[in-house]
Image (tube, rainbow, N blue to C red):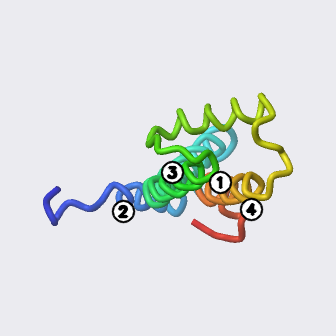
Amino acid sequence: MPAFVPSATTLLQAAATDLERDVLPALAGFPRFRTRVIVNLLRLLTRELALGAAADAAERARLQALLDADADDLPALRAELAHRLESGAIDLADDALVQHLRETLRDALAIDHPGWTGEHG
């Protein structure tokens, strides 16, 4: 991408800020609600672009270690974890599993709802 074109993250953030600052105050009722939803969606997409790849890579690495697997396909690793949990091959109380789930949830919340993790985005 040429250097003079802002990144997608910058553009999404600018759109959200413009809607929130200049458009939202002029609206009422359902149009105001719908605009607030759009602002929230733009902010979520901004966080997904900024944090999503790192969150996926961290989850993949944790699952590879937990499952002692070399697979790179994250959905396949998730499915394998589900299979092992269902079959009882991994105990729900396993410390490594609990740590993996906590870290995965923390990473997801940092994108989906950063207020729940104390982070703001």
Q: Residues within 10 Å of mark 3 (few under 14, many from 20)?
A: some
Q: Amino acid at mark 1?
A: Thr
What is the CA distance from the residue labelled 3 to the residue labelled 1?
Answer: 9 Å
Tag 2 residue? 10
Q: Secondary structure at mark 2?
A: helix
What is the CA distance from the residue labelled 4 to the residue labelled 3?
Answer: 19 Å
Q: Would residue 96 be seen by someone viewing this image from the given angle? A: yes
Q: Amino acid at mark 4?
A: Trp
- From the viewer's perspective, tell me whether residue 53 is left or right of residue 66: left
Q: Amino acid at mark 3?
A: Asp
Q: Earlier in the sequence, mark 4 or mark 2?
A: 2
Q: Earlier in the sequence, mark 4 or mark 1?
A: 1
Task: Please tell me the numbered disc located at residue 104.
Answer: 1
From the top left corner, tell me how far across and down residue 71 is, in percent. Answer: 46, 40
Tag 3 residue? 56
Task: Please tell me the numbered disc located at residue 116.
Answer: 4
